[in-house]
Image (cartoon, coloured by chain):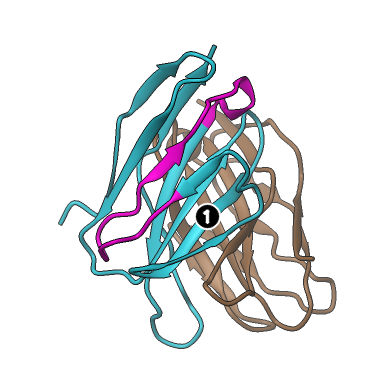
Amino acid sequence: NAGVTQTPKFRILKIGQSMTLQCTQDMNHNYMYWYRQDPGMGLKLIYYSVGAGITDKGEVPNGYNVSRSTTEDFPLRLELAAPSQTSVYFCASSSPGQGLIYEQYFGPGTRLTVT
Amino acid sequence: GNSVTQMEGPVTLSEEAFLTINCTYTATGYPSLFWYVQYPGEGLQLLLKATKADDKGSNKGFEATYRKETTSFHLEKGSVQVSDSAVYFCALSKAAGNKLTFGGGTRVLVKP
């Protein structure tokens, strides 16, 4: 049981390039999330999904796109990378449990630098 | 909207000292409250949680009590170890889809 896996671990992009951050979970969770963590800051939600084929914007969606064609995968696409997108990106998943406690499980993160 | 405020770090302590990290929140109704921990180079891990007023979450010697009257969820540990050095995040969940709202994080450094 690998949990939530993310690839790549590190990436350097030039301004204007595009890339896809991969996220896969093997816990059969319905909900998946993408967060970004800027230096010294908390995490901000970029996009989330409550199931295959359903996605919605979070707090900071501009410059990103997502898709959810399967329960397991939730890739994050950066188009036209900008220096403001330099950050650490975390993918997470959760599934409704008992009561209202929805623990989120996080991947190890992808450190992205745009220069 | 929802928000979480926690004390800024870094907090530097000696081993076996008492640790408190303050966390207050703004939200309507009764959100679920969480503390997550991030060890160096790793992703976040759930440390403890509480879902209703006066609930006490506990794990690994850490405790936090959900105080509705003061909208707080302060994290405490009676005797810290070097291995507790990490960044601690307070968070709440209220909206549909279980989206988390995080505080800014507090870095804790425990020296031997």
Image location (x, y in percent) of residue A62:
63, 43
Is A102 drawn above or below residue A6 in the view shown? below
Q: Which one is nearer the viewer's eye here, B54 or B78?
A: B54
The brown one among the chains is: B
Which chain is depicted cyan? A
Residue under label 1, please give it: A47
Query: Residue B88 occupies which quadrant of the picture?
Result: top right
Q: In the figure, A5 relative to A68: above or below? A: above
Q: Position of residue B19 (x, y in %)?
A: 64, 46
Residue B41, visible in the rendered structure: no
- Quarter occupied by the N terminus of chain B: bottom right
Is residue A115 inside the magenta stretch?
A: no
State the residue lying farthest toward the right.
B70
Q: Residue at x 38, y 61 (%)?
A: A93
Residue ID at (84%, 72%): B70
Q: Is residue B100 left or right of residue B31?
A: left
Q: Which residues are magenta?
A: A66-87
Residue A75 among magenta residues: yes
